[in-house]
Amino acid sequence: MKQSTLFTRTQKNAPKDEVSLNAQLLIRAGFIDKEMAGVYSFLPLGLRTLNKIIDIIRQEMNAIGGQELYLTALQNPELWKKTGRWSDDVLDVWFKTEVASGGEVGLGTTHEEPLTNLIKKHISSYKDLPRYVYQFQTKFRNEKRAKSGIMRLREFIMKDLYSFHTDQNDLDEYYEKAARAYANIFRRAGLGDLTYRTYASGGTFAKYSHEFQTLTEAGEDLIYICDKCHIAVNKEIIEDLEHKCPECGASNLREGKAVEVGNIFKLGTKFSAALELNYKDQNGETKPVIMGCYGIGPQRLMGTIAEILSDERGLVWPEAVAPFQVHLLSLGKNAEAEKIYDDLVKNNIEILFDDREDASAGAKFADADLIGIPWRIVLSEKSLAAGGAEIKRRNEKDSHIVPLADIERGLK
Amino acid sequence: MKQSTLFTRTQKNAPKDEVSLNAQLLIRAGFIDKEMAGVYSFLPLGLRTLNKIIDIIRQEMNAIGGQELYLTALQNPELWKKTGRWSDDVLDVWFKTEVASGGEVGLGTTHEEPLTNLIKKHISSYKDLPRYVYQFQTKFRNEKRAKSGIMRLREFIMKDLYSFHTDQNDLDEYYEKAARAYANIFRRAGLGDLTYRTYASGGTFAKYSHEFQTLTEAGEDLIYICDKCHIAVNKEIIEDLEHKCPECGASNLREGKAVEVGNIFKLGTKFSAALELNYKDQNGETKPVIMGCYGIGPQRLMGTIAEILSDERGLVWPEAVAPFQVHLLSLGKNAEAEKIYDDLVKNNIEILFDDREDASAGAKFADADLIGIPWRIVLSEKSLAAGGAEIKRRNEKDSHIVPLADIERGLK
């Protein structure tokens, strides 16, 4: 894409009321725009990045048998009354409103109730199980505080996967499979080393649930890491575990601030019992379906990457989630750059071409650093005199000259 | 995909309160589920179809220079007060609710206000124009009546494109380009012959706006068609036009019921003036930006296809929007069918394989007709004895036998 046609511009300063680093950088670079606290629009560069993250998650969900659907934001209170979660005392983040033809509706904060109810129409026998169903849907949460940029939103996309099983064993096995898929997602998104599977409270039906927590000073959680096992424990249960690693028993756990980038939870029969999702087993006996649920917020993941992998000059995207792979800067050499651009586009390389004629070299360099595309190629009088184009990775200091004929090979 | 793993089942009957044909068929075939009146979930088959339609629209928007972004559902009242559209007397389909930290918010029914406001941060000179920006976003409309299945929803995805220009000429040219892109969309989706560019009221800034209306008895609009020009006139302005075609002047217009599947509108300076979206021209003079807007609801389009192209046995999808291209039915011949399935999957043909062992031949045939995939391949004792597999198009009556080695060539 040619930058001269991109409608967004970078900005020198973020809005004064924006206190989070991730949102400051993303706004300045033209990735997002703030509609109100906790509510952000995604502009072309931001949407490309978000869609890369969504695609990684979708691939991993499909790989563990997930079938994608798309539930609704508007929620019928009747279902939620059956599980007791319509009450604001139980679920305190509802947005509620009225339908013109009469009656209240809520904006979905999560989707266990409607999905359990839907599945009832399609499952009746042990032969219909297991099933794995997921969606990317907008959730609305009426949070009292929303000051962490896109790491805590009032309106956000969530990937939620739900699994349905005949027995606990089958759930346990799938739960571990889902945990591995989650680890894949964070690794592919560039946060593998900083992200810990974290023991958390399991509620009434399981000893533990698990969160995936990524270390960052911007996080709102406190975790205790066992470096030997590469797992962590959430503060909420560290006392119960007597400050010991639940896997190896070590007590030299390291404390760190972290953000929850995903969670997996064994629901057991909590929802299937309340909403009567049953199946007939081999002997014709009626039993409640056993359920698990597995959530990730792609925007929070994007915000966490922006927060952690940025530097003082701007964003630094891993290749797997970058809006473009290559940022080509032409410093008064548009004809030669145009040729490189055409060649790379032809070879399906995602490239942003800074062809702006009214921008200075300094402005182009500053924008490239702020936007954070992994590879920067500069074409100038100077680079041509030195033998070609100057190539540099965003996260490395030094550039080198590559002959124009070898540029594609230079991108590795 | 193997049908034995698909979590949805077809249903003999639609819910009793479902009065629209499109929703009855789509629910019975397992494409959608009704959450409440005007609010439907999209199940795997339905989501695949919806995504095909969205992809067609996206391709056509990209082809006319559209840049995709993603605005928010939650809307800040302040902006809408500036244009006078926060009032329920002016815009009577708002859902409104309260933020926990204080203050009202609305759920976006359309996005002229936030987009105009956003663009202000990125446009200042004639050099920044024209710009074309679009999104697929969920709109919420608090409709009093919602009895047309997915042809009139209270919660739905809308593709809305907005264009920004320095002058009327440039808008006029782009408007015609957008109209051609819209015609492409309806043609590709299989509704080209039944869809008419329809003259409608232009509001304060233009003589006409245009709707795209598709003929169907299920439509809520009345249009007057000029068969010679292949255009129509909406009832609301037919009196003003003295019942004559605005293009050729003919008065033998044909009346028909139709559904509005898209609309394009010259907004002029209505929103740019109210929200102060200006640019500096070549002489340094400040002028308001001229705008156009262009909308399509992918779900309404899907409902219209379901409504019009179905028959007494079920849905009939055009290839471009079908959830799968081929429905392979194995009647007790799973081993041979498995081989065909693997071959077609390998060749990237989208195939649903009815491998269910507990379903009768009759049930499989009925399901295939109900689901409406364009090609049906049956493998049975009988077909093998006749020399191979039996191939039939969903919208044709007769099948024919194709040798197993020639199946892929038989799909045309």
Image (cartoon, coloured by chain):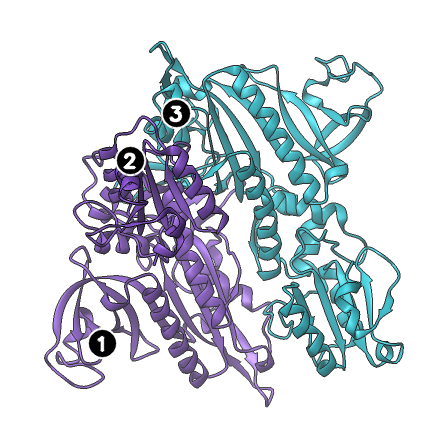
Chain colours: A purple, B cyan
Q: Is residue B38 visible?
A: no
From the viewer's perspective, is residue A115 above or below residue B297?
Answer: below
Badge 3 density bin: few <14, some 14–19, many ≥20, Cα 10 Å = some
Q: Which residue occupies the foreground of this view, A152 or A326?
A: A326
Mark 2 = which residue?
A381
Quick one: A342 or A210, which is closer to the camera?
A342
Q: Chain of mark 1?
A: A
Q: Quadrant of residue A208?
A: bottom left
Quadrant (top left/top right/bottom left/bottom right) for the C terminus of chain A = bottom left
Q: Amino acid at mark 2?
A: Glu
Number of callouts in the render?
Answer: 3
Rendered-image quadrant of the N terminus of chain A: top left
Query: Which element carries disc 3, helix, strand or loop?
Result: helix
Which x, y percent locates residue A35? 33, 37
Residue that mark 3 sits on: B128
Identified by mark 3, the residue type is Asp
